[in-house]
Amino acid sequence: MSMRTLPLLFLNLGGEMLYILDQRLRAQNIPGDKARRVLHDIISTMFNKNFIEELFKPQELYSKKALRTIYDRLAHASIMRLNQASMDKLYDLMTMALKYQVLLCPRPKDVLLVTFNHLDAIKGFIRDNPALVHLVDETSQQLIEAYGGLSAGEFQLIRQTLLTFFQDLHIRVSIFLKDKVQNSNGRFVLPVSGPVPWETEVPGLIRMFDHKGKEVKRTEFRHGGNYIAALKEGSFELYGDRVLKLGTNMYSANRPVETHTSGASKNLASQSQQSIAPNPLAKEELNFLAKLMGGMEIRKPSGPEPGFRLNLFTTDEEEEQAALTRPEELPHEVVNIQATQDQQRNQELARIMGEFEVTDQPRWSASKGDDLLAMMDEL
Amino acid sequence: MFRRERSIPLRGSAAALCNNLSVLQLPVHNLTHFGVVHGPSAQLVSAAPEGVPLAQRQLHAKERAGVSLPLITQVHWCVLPFRILLVLTSHRGIQMYESDGSVMVYWHALDSGDASPVQAVFARGIASSGHFICVGTWSGRVLVFDVPAKGPNIVLSEELAGHLTSVTDIASEHAQEQDCIADMVTADDSGLLCVWRSGPEFKLLTRIPGFGAPCTSVQLWQGIVAAGYGNGQLCLYEASTGTLHAQINAHARAICALDLAPMVGKLLSAAEDTFVHIWKLNRNLKNGCIEVEHCHGECVPDTQVCGARFCDPSGSSLAVTGYDLAEILRFSSV
């Protein structure tokens, strides 16, 4: 699959995460300065120069497990804490939202517009911090350089790679169900009306030519859909009208963040597919995680900064209930690192993980191997 | 008019690839084989005429030790003069099996040679031409394998140069007696089509340039090239000259599969816009021009179709796969 997919996946999922956290911070009446601090810390970690540099290196798309680890770390980059159940829900919402956006992109290239929508909104969260805005702009510039010249065929491969990542995820999201963009079986509605993608013609016309290229006949057929011509192309520049609405913030103060996570929605058949693979986190993924997290700069809260817990559910009781009914087969619950062949890499990752230590949870000890397993288990 | 028939369940959902359904009709045995790519595995299902599933098998791409399973790009049955082989292409290489997938008879590892780090390496595009099996690659090279009447002594006999970007699909038809008859066409990500004549050495007859959209699927019927593109357009060309004879604004999203019912000149096109359309191809005997008319359109609601095939030579039944769908949908005409 495409080796250029990770930056798009990471930045868009990160953007969705920020939309959701922003909404929950407001819904839970977290004081303005604390809320701003949280978003600021997460964004500055996300767009850290070293991290972005690692991100943009050509590489395969790694498993959902590996990626989930990054977001766990990112969500805890500040004074905010999330329980396991809330972190699960956050990740479910992020992934289903991006799956929806990728699936509904009119053209494969439009996933770039979705990314710009996320980045534009992120700049809105930190607009009072010019240095941070500049950092986000630099990432936008890197996107333009890395993707601006790709062909339609290369974008199609990127799209197929992204869809492979989201295959078999059918978690029902209340806001999608209410808006009727998702069916009750968890599948997204694919509309057959509206504007066609830029550079596509409205279906219905057949033109026939002779050997000299002269048009000799023109007929029409009933396509079955209800399409109109494309209106205008979105901007792929640093600033501009993106035209496409996918990737903009769909959560507002009035739209609470809810999911149904019915057990049946996770395709158990595909879960057992994954368990056939010998190493749940293969050596390559450990390398990838080590590199990426090595690039991440986590700022440890200085002094006895009072942290707070964010709840993705409407009440604490709901969160507890969700924790109890968490499906057993969720892969990230236990990360079995069997990479004993690569002690050195393991130690490197362990060292980096150690730097992420949270002050009130000392769990780092001298013996690396077992503790690394234990630490990953706690994620 | 088509009506839905009984679906065939799959163990895993279909991956979002193009040409993600292969069908082998075995009327003598009253059986139909279906092949669908899930991701790291491909599924083979055999079914009786009413769609009752009889047997299932899963195939995986060959892997290197300690590395995650490579993704499969395509699975396709190749009907050769004396045998039928099942070909599986992946990011690792090309595997060939006996037609029921029970025994692997040949393995060819891809050479990633001069690929840049940002380049994905894979094989994609499978077709038989006489006793050859042709497979496309990420670089644009088309590998030609010489297949004996039986046994595993398959040999890479030629590498065709003609494409500069990744091959997407290959189509062929039975060669006629005359010279200079085009019997194979290859397509790539840039939309370029190469038309070939097969033989001990394949000859490039003509090139049909693209227009920016990838050519995702291609078919060849009586010297007519049918090409489906990423912008939803379907074009018909005269194979020997490359002249455009028909341009159809067929779909609102990328076409992902084309198939032919050669006995009756029917063409089906399936796309990510959830539609499958059936067309009738025709050669006007008076002026030799190629004509096409639309026969029927079928909407597969909320399904990003990724594969579609006729299930019988008269084109009166078809099968469809969709991204994320763990079943093969079947339709028959009423």
Image (cartoon, coloured by chain):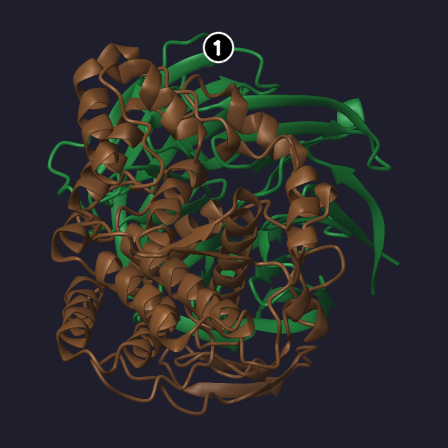
In the rendered image, which residue does mark 1 sit on?
Answer: B150
**Of residues B159 and B124, the one drawn nearer to the viewer in this rendering:** B124
**Of residues B298 and A339, the one drawn nearer to the viewer in this rendering:** A339
Callout 1: few (<14), some (14-19), or many (20+) C-alpha neighbours within 10 Å?
few
As displayed, is residue A76 above or below residue B145?
below
The outermost residue toward the front is A304
Report whether A136 appears left or right of B35: left
Q: Which quarter of the figure is the C terminus of chain B placed in?
A: bottom right
Q: How many marks?
A: 1
Picture residue at 35% right of the left edge, 84% below the top = A242
Report whether A256 appears left or right of B242: right
Report whether B262 appears left or right of B225: right
Provide residue A29's location: percent of width, then percent of height. Answer: 51, 73
Q: Give the quadrant of residue A225.
A: bottom right
Q: Secondary structure at mark 1?
A: loop
Picture residue at 38% right of the left edge, 49% below the top = A71
Give me the chain that's green.
Answer: B
- Chain label for disc 1: B
As displayed, is residue A220 above or below residue B55?
below
Give me the chain that's brown.
Answer: A
Provide residue A157's location: percent of width, then percent of height. Answer: 36, 53
Picture residue at 66% right of the left edge, 46% below the top = A320
As displayed, is residue A177 above or below residue B157?
below
Q: Which quarter of the figure is the N terminus of chain B placed in?
A: bottom right
Amino acid identity at mark 1 = Lys
Whether residue A370 is visible, yes or no, is yes
As displayed, is residue B67 above or below residue B216?
above
Picture residue at 28% right of the left edge, 38% below the top = A357
Provide residue A32's location: percent of width, then percent of height. Answer: 39, 77
